[in-house]
Amino acid sequence: MERSRELNLRLCRLIAEAKGRQMCTESFYEFVQTFWEVIIPEKPVWNWHIKYLCDELQTLAGYIVRREAKPYDLIINIPPGTTKSSLATVMFPAWLWTQDATIRVITNSYSAALAIEHATKSRDIILSDKYRHLFPHILIRRDKAAKSSYENTSGGARYATSTGGMITGIHGHLIINDDPLNPAQAISEAERKTANEHTKTLASRKVDKANTPIITIMQRLHENDVTGYLLAKKAEKIRHICLPAELSSLVTPTEVRKNYVNGLLDPVRLSRKILDEQLIDLGSRGYSGQYDQNPVADGGNIVKREWFQYISYNDFMGLKGSIPVTFFVDTAFTEKKENDPTGIIGTCKIRNDLYILCAKKVYKKFPDLIRFLPTYVKEHGYTAQSTIRIEPKANGISVVDQLQESTKLNITSTPAPTDSKETRLNAASPKVECGRVILVVGPWNEEFIEEVCGFPAKEHDEYVDLLYYAIDYHLNSESGLSAEELADLL
């Protein structure tokens, strides 16, 4: 009886072990769940993107195992703190050996210490009791068991290197380029060039050029970072997955946008509070690249940050006198933050310069917007000599009609644009470059500068349109003459 019970228990254990082995072998996501606690002490948060990335990696693994021609290389842009390295660089190589123990993997990171840490954690999984029980045929060779590079008894291997390091005499069935560029050094052209050149070198370390895929996983740090370099060079041969912390038009592929919760990729680990803290810590530029996956070139793109001039509010009021404030509005009707907001700026022309004294964006439905605009302009210097000039798109026409009907404000339309936004901003940029656009110091300055200087890489561009309209009206035509200049003409 006792022996029979022991045999039954042993049989149950064997069945459970076989079932666990099968589940881990057939599903990389199951493998990640099974071995999470081996390397990560914190309780897991199984956000949707983890299974999504696991499935993407498993799909690509099928081509590697079958030694079939790869369909694409893979780029994953995703914020820090989303388990990207644990999935792709730590667990994925260990799981690949359960599919084919002869696979050789090369992994790369921006520093040798980080690369070794990833390789060591992967080795910890392979040496764990759980892994050895489920996959007893996978054994690391004792004579080749270093932290950075090790081999198994079936001929499989894991080689870790770092950006700028030597990669000679080794070739891989898979190359994983995880954080090839240090965020703190991304502003350096020399560092970016080193990372891009190293990426070229990695591409030469393939066992089979037709079969060996390269997985690049990183945050966007600059428009010319490794992701930018690869997309510019071979976009048609790349599957690009872009998962910003906040829902935007950059989320790729588009079908995963429905998985965002209240506009957030991971509402637990990357909550609104946490993202707000990161924005303070990193600044808008760093946050834009690392969390929004939206890089901005040094100093700006078409318009450079240093071109703008500044003046204090008191000094501005001393210059302004009785010159009226002109407002420009780019309208949208929505309360949803993932859509376009309504933008508004207040401006003056003093002598030959354009002064911008206020700027704001709001998300409001039509009735609320109609109530908001009169209040806002009156709080920011509107007088009987002022005009409110509204972009004449579909929403703008409705706003013009309603405000003309229900208020005594001086409402008109800006000329309908015929050129692209890029063409218009390029045409207006010389006025900024020569110091003729002056910002009154205020809390709105940074948002305005970031958007204008980040165009066309930024998600929204309302301030770009409004700046062009203001420059065109005040500095390019007689309609923009100041009260003082009109008096001189008369």
Image: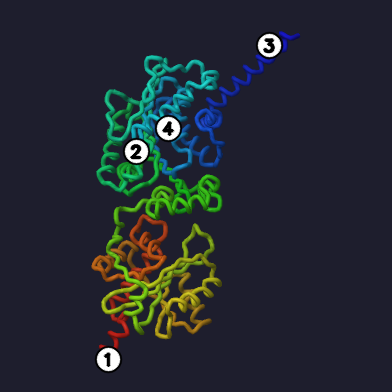
Q: Nearer the viewer, residue 390 or 234?
A: 390
Mark 4 = which residue?
Answer: 89
Q: Which amino acid, by three-letter code, is at mark 1? A: Leu
* Distance Cα–Cα, label 2 vs label 1: 65 Å
Mark 1 vs 4, N-terminal side: 4
Question: Which label belongs to residue 180?
Answer: 2
Residue 46 location, quadrant: top right
Mark 1 vs 3, N-terminal side: 3
Judged by depth in the image, the label closer to the viewer, 2 or 1, is: 2
Q: Is residue 54 shown to the viewer in this render? A: yes
Mark 2 vs 4, N-terminal side: 4
Position of residue 57 measured from the top left corner of the image (x, y, whole percent): 46, 34
Q: Is residue 427 shown to the viewer in this render? A: no
Q: Residues within 10 Å of mark 4 (few under 14, many from 20)?
A: many
Mark 2 vs 1, N-terminal side: 2
* Residue found at the far front of this picture: 314
Q: Which amino acid, by three-letter code, is at mark 2? A: Pro
User: Dot 4 lies on which element?
Assistant: helix
Mark 3 = which residue?
Answer: 7
Q: Where is 482 relative to 263, above or below? A: below
Mark 1 = which residue?
Answer: 490
Q: Where is 95 relative to 396, above or below? A: above
Q: Nearer the viewer, residue 399 or 142?
A: 142
Taking the spot 38% from the left edge, 62% from the top edge, the residue there is 446
| 351 relative to 21 in the view: left or right | left
* Distance Cα–Cα, label 1 vs label 4: 74 Å
Q: Which amino acid, by three-letter code, is at mark 3? A: Leu
Residue 318 location, quadrant: bottom left
